[in-house]
Image: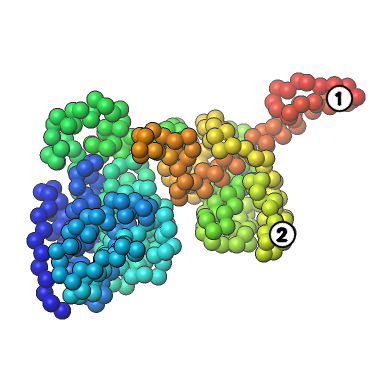
């Protein structure tokens, strides 16, 4: 192994990070602070100095294309002068010939691709935009056998998973915690900050430049509603009532995640008692979880495509659930926009179990409109990411809950003998005729 030395000149606020001794680090930084460059510099320094055979390091962004757009040019630029460096454009990795170390770029949108690898260190960029399971199920185990390190970097987007990491880092002696606010870092001049403040909302400025976690996720469909629920005490400990049926609503994925919301229709509103999510498992796996928890007796609301027959088995998922003793109810087709509006209208009557629904609430908080980077406007449809399946399942739950409410109204307002209701079964419908 040939010794190799490089000279890194970081921005002043990041010098302490490059010289750190802690295994874990969290950097909360304003936009254009240079956090990605500092982390790429750190990856390079640790890769070329590593004495472990075939060391592996990773830069991980929420999306693979984002990793390529944000970090790949930096990685090639800063390693171009290092003798024996071999960049691989198709796989987005750089290998250092003198010791066999490698730095590779990944996207958390396909975190299963990283299952089975080992890592000596990694950067988690914009961790709050990632599915939390990417860290807990794949990346953290990949660091274990070689006692690898990890750094979480990002700009706040509400109180999501990145906020939890930031809080942990601030409260732990074995973490390095850095917070860089634009008003304090000196990295952006005062005139530029003044101009940004004039052209942005107060919440946007506080989030993007002053590292505020209190501003709602920009473009979030349910962020403000969740904040209201928390403030009003509707995110709490929910006791399951033995006197009320337990219903479920399913987002039936195949290759993607499967999500189930479990709820009861109580006198005060919709009691959301559990959120279940997994990946790549058969229907029997989820039915087993529900049965073991005692979640049965009510309706299982499924989207209209559950009636489509599988080419492998010749049976629909609707038929499969029936055969397993469940009570699937096929929901009529509805547009995503109508479904989102339906959830918004119902949200003030929703109560969530604080512990069992924690991951689901986090996903809902991050469910937001897609953003057109070129036009700088929000698109008319949601962004499809790790939060989408949870949000879709809640739309189905809201549809099911409304059907239950209609059934309760009809049970109370039964027609007199010799009369039947005409028209849609809605509360207050007084169209009737005699037979």
Asked where in the image residue 281 lies, by quadrant, the reply is bottom right
- On screen, 294 above or below 99? above
Badge 1: few (under 14), some or many (20 or more) residues near its Cα, within 10 Å? few
The residue singled out by tag 2 in the image is: 315
- Which of the marked residues, 1 or 2, is nearer the chain's N terminus? 2
Image coords of residue 181 (percent x, y):
19, 39
Image coords of residue 427 (percent x, y):
69, 26
Asked where in the image residue 370 lies, by quadrant, the reply is top left
Image coords of residue 238 (percent x, y):
53, 43
- On screen, 370 above or below 121? above
The residue singled out by tag 1 in the image is: 419
Identify the disc placed on residue 325.
Answer: none
- Is residue 126 visible in this depiction of the protein? yes
Badge 2: few (under 14), some or many (20 or more) residues near its Cα, within 10 Å? few
Kindly report the distance in space between the C-alpha atoms of the residues bearing marks 1 and 2: 40 Å
Asked where in the image residue 335 lies, by quadrant, the reply is top right
**Label 2: which secondary element:** loop
């Amino acid at each position: 192994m040939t010794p190799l030395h490089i000279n890194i000149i970081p921005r002043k606020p990041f010098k302490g990070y490059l010289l750190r001794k802690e295994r874990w680090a969290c950097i909360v930084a304003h936009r254009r602070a240079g956090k990605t460059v500092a982390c790429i510099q750190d990856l390079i320094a640790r890769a070329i100095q590593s004495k472990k055979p075939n060391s592996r390091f990773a830069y991980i962004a929420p999306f693979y294309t984002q990793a390529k757009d944000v970090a790949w040019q930096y990685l090639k630029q800063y390693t171009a002068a290092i003798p024996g460096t071999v960049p691989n454009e198709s796989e987005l990795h750089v290998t250092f010939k003198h010791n066999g170390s490698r730095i590779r770029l990944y996207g958390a949108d396909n975190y299963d691709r990283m299952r089975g690898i080992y890592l000596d260190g990694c950067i988690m960029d914009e961790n709050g935009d990632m599915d939390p399971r990417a860290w807990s199920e794949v990346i953290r185990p990949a660091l274990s056998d070689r006692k690898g390190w990890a750094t979480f970097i990002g700009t706040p987007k509400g109180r999501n998973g990145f906020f939890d990491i930031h809080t942990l880092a601030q409260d732990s002696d074995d973490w390095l915690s850095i917070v860089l606010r634009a008003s304090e870092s000196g990295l952006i001049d005062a005139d530029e900050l003044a101009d940004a403040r004039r052209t942005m909302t107060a919440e946007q400025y506080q989030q993007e430049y002053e590292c505020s976690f209190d501003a709602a996720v920009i473009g979030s469909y349910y962020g403000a509603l969740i904040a209201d629920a928390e403030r009003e005490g509707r995110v709490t400990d929910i006791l399951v009532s033995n006197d009320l049926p337990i219903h479920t609503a399913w987002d039936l994925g195949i290759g993607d995640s499967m999500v189930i919301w479990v709820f009861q229709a109580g006198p005060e509103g919709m009691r959301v008692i559990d959120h279940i999510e997994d990946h790549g498992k058969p229907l029997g796996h989820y039915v087993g979880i529900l049965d073991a928890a005692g979640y049965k007796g009510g309706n299982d609301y499924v989207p209209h495509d559950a009636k489509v027959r599988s080419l492998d088995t010749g049976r629909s998922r609707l038929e499969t659930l029936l055969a397993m003793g469940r009570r699937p109810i096929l929901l009529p087709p509805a547009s995503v926009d109508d479904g989102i509006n339906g959830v918004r209208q119902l949200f003030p009557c929703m109560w969530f179990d604080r512990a069992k629904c924690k991951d689901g609430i986090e996903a809902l908080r991050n469910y937001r409109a897609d953003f057109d980077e070129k036009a700088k406007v929000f698109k008319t449809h949601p962004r499809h990411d790790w939060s989408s399946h949870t949000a879709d399942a809640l739309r189905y739950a809201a549809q099911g809950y409304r059907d239950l409410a209609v059934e309760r109204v009809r049970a109370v307002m039964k027609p007199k003998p010799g009369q039947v209701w005409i028209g849609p079964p809605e509360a207050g419908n007084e169209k009737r005729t005699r037979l």
